[in-house]
Amino acid sequence: MAIADPYANFSFLVEIDGIVRAGFHEVSGVDSSIDVIEHQEGNDTVTRKYPGRVKYSNIVLRWGLADDTDLYQWHQQWVTGDPAAKRKTGSIVLQDRRGKTELARWNFTNAWPCRYTAPSLNAEGNDIAIETLELAHEGVERA
């Protein structure tokens, strides 16, 4: 049996209920953790460890500023208290090096944009202007 090479991390896209973007600079925060509850009974010298609450980090999306404002407008709905603001389901899709074949997928549920950050601007810089959107959500799993 041959051992497969690990996947590269640069070819990916994000799908959020009808919004599909491949031009992201970075996606981070796709993780989960379980609180550890320690308990000691009576004179037992061993501390038992039990699983507690499951927690998910916020997913952070970073992309180069362009004319597309779909994600910003979604955040603005929440900022203004628009009753049409909806939680969304989405996926982070890792593709092969050519961007043709899906290699892995992480699905997240009940997401809403809890933070937006405009690009840092510098008259002496030559970097791409990067927007950031942070998504609070209620679960992520690798499909």
Image (spheres, grey):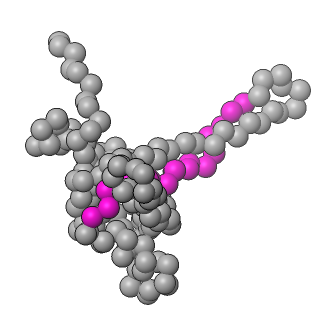
Q: Percent position (x, y) of residue 66? A: 27, 64
Can residue 139 be seen in this snapshot?
no
Vertical order, 43 against 69 (above or below): above
- The residue positioned 49% from the left and 54% from the top of the image is 58
> Would residue 6 appear left or right of 73 to someone viewing this image?
left
Vertical order, 44 against 116 (above or below): above
Q: Percent position (x, y) of residue 21? A: 24, 58
Residue range corresponding to the magenta coloring: 48-66
Vertical order, 76 against 114 (above or below): below
Give the total of numbered labels: 0
> Would residue 107 appear left or right of 60 to someone viewing this image?
left
Q: Main secondary structure of the magenta part?
A: strand
Does the magenta portion include 28? no
Task: Give the quadrant of residue 10.
Answer: top left
Task: Give the quadrant of residue 64.
Answer: bottom left
Between 89 and 121, the one lying in front of the other is 121
Q: Percent position (x, y) of residue 34? A: 58, 42
Can residue 88 be seen in this snapshot?
yes
Q: Percent position (x, y) of residue 95? A: 20, 41
> Which residue is the extreme one toward the right?
43
Quarter containing the C terminus:
top left
